[in-house]
Amino acid sequence: MDDLEIDREIEVQYTQIKLSPGELLEIFPEAKEVIRTKIREWQEQQEKIINREIRPFLKSLKKEVKDEFTAWFIEKVFEIFYVGDRLIQTIKQMERLKRLEIIVNGFKVSGENFMLEIERARNIPIVDIVYSLNLSPIRRSGKNFSCICPFHPDRNPSMYIYPETNSFYCFGCNTGGDVITFIEKYYGFSFKQAVMYLIKGG
């Protein structure tokens, strides 16, 4: 069984909520290292997109385009259409693998249905959460939304919200993830605290 087959089998069991973390580890003792390796690979992919494509483009844009509005417009088009989809995919893959990592590490919490509660929390629309926090005006940008990022000093909206994947990404501070990650970072919560906050409605 290769790495991809192991990864798929663990996710199948996770989705069906049939095996405990202990049982998964008995069947797939190599899972921990495979998942760690995959997370590192996706993190490297994300860093490549940021360092080799986004940053060089923005640097050259600042040199060549003097008009502030034109520079801002070109930057947003570049973010949305050129690298946006690939960044979303890297974020999605990392979040999926982190969920698997939690499982194989035996996430210790009270309550038999906590894995179901994690999924319930993860499906709460991130757009609604951002609206409820009154962070800044949220603007529609095609299928997505943009707003001021709460994680760094941000004059122009640099955080994008992607309803299709229920995730966010800031092109200013390179922070991204799902709705649970957003709540963790915004309030300084642990993973469990963020899940409980979301499912209890704040």
Image: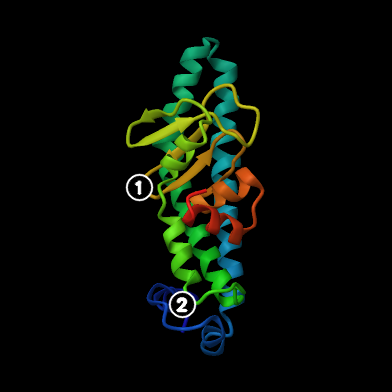
Q: Which mark is residue 126?
A: none
Q: Are marks 1 and 2 in contact (CB under 8 Å)?
A: no
Q: Could you tell me the amino acid type at mark 2?
A: Ile
Q: Is residue 173 above or below residue 165?
A: above
Residue at 53% x, 14% y is 65
Q: Is residue 68 left or right of residue 82?
A: right
Q: Which mark is residue 10?
A: 2
Residue 123 at x, y percent in the picture: 40, 55
Give the mark nearer the N terminus: 1 vs 2. 2
Q: Is residue 4 above or below residue 185?
A: below
Label 2 SS: helix
Label 1 SS: loop
Farthest residue in the bottom direction? 26
Q: Could you tell me the amino acid type at mark 1?
A: Glu
Quickly name the residue at label 1. 164
Residue 176 at x, y percent in the picture: 54, 46
Residue 109 at x, y percent in the picture: 60, 72
